[in-house]
Image (spheres, rainbow, N blue to C red):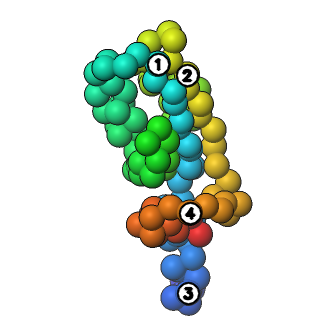
Amino acid sequence: MNLLVIIPDYLCKIYSKIVEMKNIYIISYDLKIPGRDYTSLYDAIKSLGDWQHPLESTWVIATNDYDENVIYSRLKETMDNSDFLLIFEVKPHNRQGWLPKSFWEWMNLKTI
């Protein structure tokens, strides 16, 4: 016996957003050596997944491929021992701020 199940469009859209939803991490740093080339750090951040750079020393990435420990390991090797690094997962529904509209549009695409 074959069974045909029809799923309403609105449920398909909700499900597709859930499947696409990624973990959101904030990466913030304090770079202590003036004039040092930190291109390798920036490239490492960009390689982690979808990203935004809304503030001078803050990046936001969306990924399901890495957790905060892997992110830390990958970034720390591109930094000096005197630099500081902070990484934490964000619960995207609990947020507030004043940033460019493009950032909030990006966040809305990454979350439900």
The residue to which callout 3 is attached is 10
The image quarter in which residue 45 lies: top left
Determine whether, in the image, residue 92 is placed left or right of residue 32.
right
Amino acid under disc 3: Tyr
Q: Nearer the viewer, residue 89 or 10?
A: 89
Determine the secondary structure under disc 1. Answer: loop
> Mark on residue 84?
2
Q: Earlier in the sequence, mark 2 or mark 1?
A: 1
- Would you call the spot at circle 4 few (<14 residues within 10 Å), some (14-19), or many (20 or more)? few
Element marked by disc 4: loop
User: Tag 1 or tag 3, which sits nearer the N-term?
Assistant: 3
Circle 4 residue: 98
Give the mark nearest the N terminus, 4 or 2.
2
Q: Quadrant of residue 48?
A: top left
The residue carrying pointer 3 sits among few (fewer than 14), some (14 to 19) or many (20 or more) residues within 10 Å by Cα, namely few
CA distance for labels 3 and 4? 31 Å
Give how far across and how far down residue 1 sits, in percent: 57, 83
CA distance for labels 3 and 1: 50 Å
Q: Position of residue 42 (x, y in %)?
A: 34, 33
Q: Closer to the observer: label 3 or label 4?
A: 4
Q: Can you name the residue that lies furthest to the right here?
A: 94
Name which of mark 1 and mark 4 comes first in the sequence. Answer: 1
User: Contact (CB < 8 A) between labels 2 and 1?
Assistant: yes
Contact between labelled residues 4 and 1, with CB atoms less than 8 Å apart:
no
Classed neighbour count for the residue bearing mark 2: other residues with Cα under 10 Å, few (<14), some (14–19), many (≥20): few
Kindly identify the amino acid type of the residue bearing the numbered disc 2. Answer: Phe
